Image (cartoon, coloured by chain):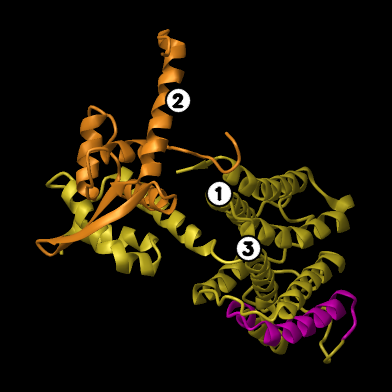
Amino acid sequence: MAEGSRGLSEPAYFVLAALLDGPKHGHAIIKTVLALSEHRVKLPVGTLYGALDRLAAGGLVVLDREETVDGRRRRYFRLTEEGGTQLRAEALRLRQAASIVIGTALA
Amino acid sequence: MTTLERQYRLLLRAYPHNYRSDHGGELLDVLLETTEPGRRLPPAREAVALLVAGARTRLTQAARGRAWPDGLHLGVTVLTLIQLATLVPYAGRVPLWVAVSAAAFLAVLRGRVLLALPLVAAAGVKVWGITHGRPVLDHTILPVYADPLWDAPALYGTGGPIAPAVSYLVAVAGLAVLALRREPVRARSWAWVAAAPVLAGADPAWLDVGGGLGGGSMPVVARVALESALLAGAAWAGRLTGDHRWAIAAGAYLLPALAILFENLAAQTRQDAVHWIVLLTLTLVAAAMPHRGRRHAVL
């Protein structure tokens, strides 16, 4: 990996994937990741917010809005253009890596 | 407040105060929402994740500003803490110099570089006198025996004079460099003060090489384990943040430690050799990790 480029950890990958269909708050991201991964990835709360902080610092997600529901403050995060680009690049890399084993030729 | 909520609030203290103020309530809500009903204690996975994420947030916040002056200040803070802890068991015999050393440590801790510089230098001159058997600056009766509470040899009685001199020289040089910058130095937490009596109990006078690890006493083993854990922590911090400040501090700590090695080369046991290899390796790893952290940043 070239200097300055950033890889995506598994939690970060799933967090970005969970935001593909629009902004979400923390609890909704956890539920979406659980569903997307077929109950394989249950993000601990500390891991989720740590990933969100790093993704926000890296410009891959941004704070969309804040809402207070039943006295509870919720931050909604949104995927940025850069975040979408990195997510697709990582997905392609994973598909390429998987094809080595599965034998599927890339288009 | 339920037991579960109380436990989560306790775990959230791993995060810095400002982070807790801004986001602690939100994290707590999500934690309580996602924990299965009926649980009284947090799942181990959530607890570990909170502790790791809290530590990571603290390190990320600590890695702000220029790395080398802060790393140098951290290194000098550690050295003056050890210098004080070394003198603590002799407080009844040399109370003035324990007080000077304590004042020096506190001044360094709170970023008062110009105040700390003469205090560390004075304590260094006094220690040089003690290690050379000369009563400089005041009439200290030599050798300086430990107070009855402590089961310790005479002050600097089991090592050579070079290592303590290197320790004070590195501290004075570091403070001089920081003073010449004429820029404010960060004040560190008062929590550091608690480490002085703890380290005194763990025998920080790491000059008894012959009877050190070779002797295998519990305080020495505890000290080496703590030292290794802190250096490993410095490497982890560098890896996470890509920042050199912890490696610089580790280097400042290593210099007097290496002086002990060379000064007592003939008296080294196999356990001592292992100790030095671990120390050197961890410091080198701490120095290399920030480069790796920058090359392989993972979000």
The residues tagged by marks 1 and 3 sit, at their Cα atoms, a distance apart of 16 Å
Mark number displayed over residue B236 = 1
Q: Main secondary structure of the magenta part?
A: helix
Chain shown orange: that is A
Q: Pointer 2: residues within 10 angstroms few (<14), some, or many (20+)?
A: few
Disc 2 designates what residue? Answer: A93
Is residue B92 in view?
A: no
Depth check, front residue: B127 or A42: A42
Q: Tell me the subunit letter for badge 2.
A: A
- The span from disc 3 to disc 2 (Cα, nearest Å) is 35 Å
Quadrant of the image occupied by residue B195? bottom right
Where is residue B247? Give x, y as percent: 66, 55
Location of the N terminus of chain B (image quadrant): bottom left
Given contact means CB atoms under 8 Å apart, are the residues at marks 1 and 3 in contact? no
Chain letter, disc 1 residue: B
Query: Measuring 28% from the left and 62% from the top, which residue is drawn there?
Result: B24
Tell me the residue that label 3 is attached to: B67
